[in-house]
Amino acid sequence: MIDLVKELKDIKSVGISGHIRPDGDCVGSTMAVYLYIRKNMPEIDAHIYLESPPPVFECIKDIDKVEDPKAGKDIVFDAFIMIDTVKDRSGDAEALYDKAKKRINIDHHITNPGTDSDVNFIVPTASSAAELVYECFDEKLMDTEIAKAVYIGMVHDTGVFQYSNVSPKTLNYAAKLIGYGFDFSTIIAETFYEKTYLQSQILGRVLSESILVMDGKVSVGHIDQKMAKFYNSHPFDYDGIVNALKQIKGVDVAIFMHELPDHKYKVSLRSTDRIDVSEVCAYFGGGGHKKAAGVVMEGNFYDVVNNLTARIEKQYAERTDQRI
Ligand code: 5GP
Ligand code: MN
């Protein structure tokens, strides 16, 4: 556990960032740290860098202060806090992190080796980076807006406190957070469940065109560049699609992929506890958690599916209970 106030003692400038294509945990946890520093250490010149946060997070105070990492390229920060990721997945923020005098890494990914930083707070059993960020705070120094940002991070990485990464500690923290008094019900409805009409149409299309492979144990849905152009959609429009593919009865692993330029696919995997998708993704250079992981892979749709299913097959083959 680290105490953020102590870690930033005598620090004059701090940069904060997270991973590319930031999700709710990434936006919530980085914004919470930014707000906490602004409130309690106003003498520090604090900057938050993220690739454009999804519009649903407009409810977070000061989200308009988020800067493009390219804007900070000439700054050498006294400290840089990287949250919810290894530096390799932080896009243009990586260069800022590398140059900083003190590098702090707060993360909950099992695939993070903890070799990037001067100060590590990496706990793979934590439900979310937000849960760890909360542990770096002094409760007395928090306010409603900070609590709300932390809560959003926890909600998003736990699927509204449903996934098995939820521990008694997670719920205990959530209980304390809602005590700060924000409209948690509306936050969950509007940032987690609500979809635009376009997002709903895309979800419907991906599900109707999805395929089942490996005797129905693996579902695959995808969006190619042509489809993305047709809908004029962005990656944040695809949030939740992989979960819908995972809800199909009999499915152990859901694969959702969307095409990037240069013959690459961004792949998201979700699984039951029968398959460790972080192992599958790490094999191809990605990472994540046992039941939720991701990777960018080269090749066409069939190459990607074949490569992934080969690794999944291998895990089934290695299972000792033979319940295949
Ligand atoms: P998602 O599928 O929602 O993008 O990500 C699921 C989990 O895997 C998240 O915890 C995310 O941080 C991690 N993840 C997703 N894509 C990548 C990737 O390309 N590389 C690594 N290292 N982790 C990823
Ligand atoms: Mn996370």
Image (cartoon, rainbow, N blue to C red):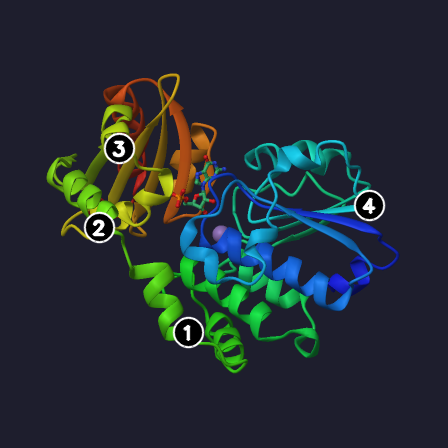
Kind of residue indicated by mark 1: Phe
Instruction: Tell me which residue sits at (32%, 46%) in the image.
Output: 270
Q: Distance from label 1 to label 2 (Cα)?
A: 23 Å
On the image, the x and y values in percent for residue 34 come to 65, 57
**In front: 183, or 98?**
183
Q: Distance from label 3 to label 4 (Cα)?
A: 47 Å
What is the quadrant of the N terminus in the image? bottom right
Q: Which residue is mark 2?
A: 197
Callout in the foreground (4, 2):
2
Callout in the foreground (3, 4):
4
Kind of residue indicated by mark 2: Tyr
Q: Distance from label 1 to label 4 (Cα)?
A: 35 Å
Q: Give SS at disc 1.
A: helix
Q: Where ligand 1 lies, by quadrant?
A: top left
Q: Which residue is mark 3?
A: 313
Query: Who comes first in sequence, dot 1 or dot 2?
Result: 1
**In front: 123, or 236?**
236
Kind of residue indicated by mark 4: Asp
Asked if labels 3 and 2 touch by Cβ distance under 8 angstroms, the answer is no
Query: Who comes first in sequence, dot 3 or dot 4?
Result: 4
On the image, the x and y values in percent for residue 256 come to 28, 38
Q: Which residue is mark 1?
A: 184
Callout in the foreground (1, 2):
2
Asked whether, in this view, residue 104 is left or right of residue 144, the answer is right
Residue 193: image quadrant is bottom left
